[in-house]
Amino acid sequence: MLKQVSIYAENKKGTMQDITGILADNGINILGSVTNDSAEYGIVRMVVSDPDAATAALTAKGYLCRLTDVLGVEVTDEVGNLHHLLMALSESNINVDYLYLSFNRLSGKPIMVFHADGAYEVAECLKAKGFSLC
């Protein structure tokens, strides 16, 4: 199970630079990220090298943060593999709330990071179907 840092931030010039600077100053590596924005606020979701330290550092600078369990599934870099993963989830009646891409720095393979309700049960389901979780 991966821990994702969700950062609720004002949608204004320099916010991402501020967030990434805080992480860099604390020696925290960003492994995967997705940003959802609206006119005034956005949510930056990240898998980082040290989620607890990232949350503490960002909170100390005034950002509202939350840790969330997400799943990471390593897939091969081939046409249709994301579709194969999503079909396996659909066949088990599992809804994916959102997903984004990272990669395994050791194997070089893509990792699909996603959120679904009941993360521990979803993990067991995927393992039973032969998927490699991170």
Image: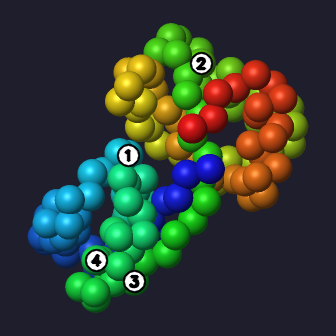
- In primary-sequence order, the first of circles 1 and 3 is 1
Residue 64's mark? 3
Amino acid at circle 1: Gly
Viewer-closest of 52 and 20: 52
Q: Nearer the viewer, mark 1 or mark 2?
A: 1
Residue 18 seen in the figure? yes
Rendered residue at 76%/52% (across/down): 120
**SS class, disc 2:** helix
Give the residue at mark 4.
57
Q: Position of residue 37 (x, y in %)?
A: 37, 65
- Distance CA(mark 1)–CA(mark 3): 19 Å
Amino acid at circle 4: Ala
Residue 81's mark? 2
Give the residue at mark 1.
32
- In primary-sequence order, the first of circles 1 and 4 is 1
Vertical comparison of 103 with 109: above or below = below
- Distance CA(mark 1)–CA(mark 4): 18 Å
Mark 4 surroundings: few (<14), some (14-19) or many (≥20) residues within 10 A: some
- In primary-sequence order, the first of circles 2 and 4 is 4
